[in-house]
Image: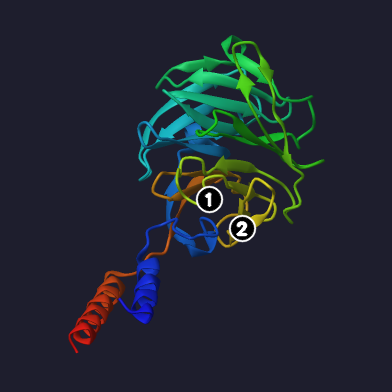
Amino acid sequence: MPTFIRSTAALILAACMPLGASAAGLDLSRYSLTQTLALPTSTASESSAITWNWDNDHLYVVGDEGEYITEVTRSGTVVSSMRLSGFDDTEALTYIGNGQFVVGEERIQDVYKLSYQAGGTASRGSLATVSLGATVGNVGLEGLSYDRASGQFVTVKEKGPQFVGLGSINFSNGTHTVGSLFTPSLGVADLSDVQTLSGFVGTSYAGNLLIISQESRSLLEVTRAGVVVSSFDFSSISDTAEGVTIASDGTIYLTDETPNIYVLTAAVPEPETFALMFSGLAVLGAVAARRRHA
């Protein structure tokens, strides 16, 4: 096939590539708000963290009052809840597989592993726990995310100073190796939550992170060297959003104190655009055939 046809075809196919095909990263500039899901104030009051369960394709949220973890379908239907006992300041939540979660307390910077039981109760004093740092004020552990590729965790501390960490957490013996991943210089006022993209194996951005800043109303895509690849301004959506997660199809979910879940999806070409693209390929093929037989 002639070079100009190959080049044109490559451009058309690149435009047709599915979500996440950008070489530079996930590219948050392609995302927009497509749905707002209301959460029950009875069990999700002041929702502060959200995580996606890849085993059942449901979302789980926790409020910063430390009262419940709530299970919600991706369309917003509340499925169940689990009461938390003895918790005060739950700002971090991540799914680690097999029905297990890790929840974090901000001020004391401790994390706890629990098995979710619909309608059950998780008592803080009975759970396996690890301390990730000294007790601080309301500027401590704001988010953590399980890295499915390595089995490690990425954590963020809000500010005073901001901190992004990476390491293992051993709940069996109460130890951890979480150390600084990079020195944050992201241009935001605080760090509110983090989500790894490690589930997107084989993509150029599987090593990147999503980091949300509640005070700056900004969602960032960041490399593990601390370079901002793309960003999304959610100032017109919420001023209290501080939790973020992402599902396997690239749909991003934010949660805030309202409490709501905000669904962000990336723009893809309309069916008519696909038709034009492929008709263009057909024309190019016909031109190439005529030239071969000329």
Residue matched to label 2: 229
- The residue positioned 75% from the left and 47% from the top of the image is 184
- The residue positioned 54% from the left and 34% from the top of the image is 147
Secondary element type, mark 1: loop
Tell me residue 89's x, y (percent). 66, 29
Looking at the picture, the colour scheme in use is rainbow
Residue 232 lies, with reference to residue 75, above or below; the image says below
The quadrant in which residue 2 appears is bottom left
Q: How many marks?
A: 2
Residue 38 lies, with reference to residue 28, above or below; the image says above
Q: Label 1: how many residues lie within 10 Å, few (<14), some (14-19) or many (20+)?
A: many
Q: Is residue 287 visible?
A: yes
Q: Label 2: how many residues lie within 10 Å, few (<14), some (14-19) or many (20+)?
A: some
- The residue positioned 76% from the left and 25% from the top of the image is 133
In screen coordinates, is 278 left or right of 197?
A: left
The quarter of the picture where the C terminus appears is bottom left
Residue matched to label 1: 205
Disc number at residue 152? none
Q: Which numbered disc, 1 or 2, marks the residue that appears first in the sequence? A: 1
Toward the bottom, the furthest residue is 294
Secondary element type, mark 2: strand
Q: Nearest the camera: 90 or 146? A: 146
Amino acid residing under circle 1 = Tyr
Tell me residue 254's x, y (percent). 52, 48
Tell me residue 181's x, y (percent). 70, 39
Amino acid residing under circle 2 = Val
Tell me residue 226's x, y (percent). 69, 49
- The residue positioned 60% from the left and 16% from the top of the image is 171
The quadrant in which residue 166 appears is top right
Contact between labelled residues 2 and 1, with CB atoms less than 8 Å apart: yes
